[in-house]
Every structure is written in C-alpha cells, then in structure tokens.
Image: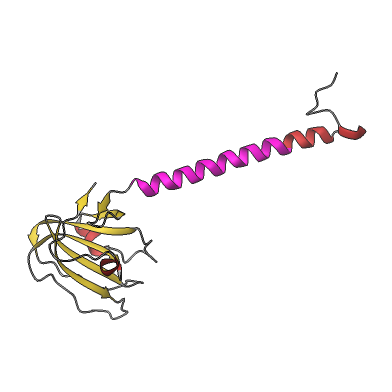
Amino acid sequence: MSDPIVSPPHGEEGSGVVVANHRVVTIVAILILTALISTFFLLKSSHPTVRLPDGTVIAVEIADSPKERRIGLSDHIFLDPDRGMLFLLDGLSRPAFWMKDMRFPIDIVWLRERVVVGIQPSLQPTTVENPPSVRPASDITEVLEVNAGFAAKHHLKIGDELSYE
C-alpha cells in the first residue's frame, strides 16, 4: 500500500509530492509568521511602563543620557496612543524643551519624584530653526512626553502620582 501524502492522486504522476511540499511550505510560513508576531509583542512590551492614576498603563522609552534627552521624540514619525517617552534627569532642575524637528504635537508632563507638578498641553511641531522653548515652573526630576491631548483625556492634574514599572 502506498503512502497517501506522496502517492499521486487520481493517477497523476508526481502531484502528491507537490501537495506534500505545499503543506510543508504552508506550515513553515505559519511558524515564521507566529514567531514574528510573538517577537513584535515581546519587543513592544519590553519597554518600562508608567501607570496613571486612572489605571492606564503606557510603555515608555527612557531618555536618561544627554544625547537621548536632546533627541527626545524628534526621530519619531508618530507615537502610538499607548506610548510615551520618560526623561530621567540628573537631580532637580528646570530644563528647557523645544519642538525642533518634531513631526507631531505632544503634551509635556513635568514630574518631581513621580508627582505631576505641571502640564504643558498640545505643543505643536515647528520648522523654525530656533523655536521657543518651554520650562517647568518649578524644579523637576522627570518629564513624560505623550501625544497631544493625552493628559486631558486621562484627567491628569497637578498632584497626581504616577508609578513606574
């Protein structure tokens, strides 16, 4: 008795091998696709997270070196709604932030030891070579940048405490 996978159906010579090869290719393609999807979600979730008082959790990129702070989000074309950038500063300071080379509007949330001390909403991108900068009203230790409208949507206000994971 012949093997049903490789034996030619309906008397056609060799077509059973084609069917077997097609199945192998399909299985390999499914395995590769599954691996790619798994890797995407693993990489996306491997970022640290910030939890807001309303329970929302966003994945953040960390900017903790002078170069990373200088570039910020300016090398991003867009920012997913559940993403942000967290700037970790070297102690208390009042750093200046600007929208040079930005491609989308953002909210800046000024933080001191994870507590909101100010919010600069809806800063717009600019093509001006030396755009004006914004500074917090008081000393801060961290800055959270998110899409414009994010702070209002999540009812962030001065005194709210964020947690980092």
Q: Position of residue 41 (x, y in %)?
A: 43, 47
Q: Is residue 22 above or below residue 64?
A: above
Q: Position of residue 45 (x, y in %)?
A: 36, 47
Q: Position of residue 142 (x, y in %)?
A: 16, 58
* Residue that lies at the very extreme toward the top in this rendered image: 1
Image point 16% across, 56% down: which residue?
A: 161
Image point 39% across, 46% down: which residue?
A: 43
In the rendered image, the quadrant that contains the N terminus is top right
Magenta span? 22-46
Q: Quadrant of residue 126?
A: bottom left
Q: Position of residue 90 (x, y in %)?
A: 11, 55
Q: What colour scheme does the image use? A: secondary structure
Q: Is residue 37 above or below residue 96?
A: above
Q: Quadrant of residue 33?
A: top right
Quick check: can you spot residue 139?
Answer: yes
Q: Is residue 2 left or right of residue 32?
A: right
Q: Is residue 59 above or below residue 75?
A: above
Q: Is residue 25 magenta?
A: yes
Q: Is residue 141 left or right of residue 69?
A: left
Q: Is residue 147 left or right of residue 158?
A: right
Q: Is residue 40 magenta?
A: yes
Looking at the picture, tell me which residue is in the foreground, 149 or 144: 149
Image point 32% across, 71% down: which residue?
A: 102
Our reading of the magenta stretch's main secondary structure is helix
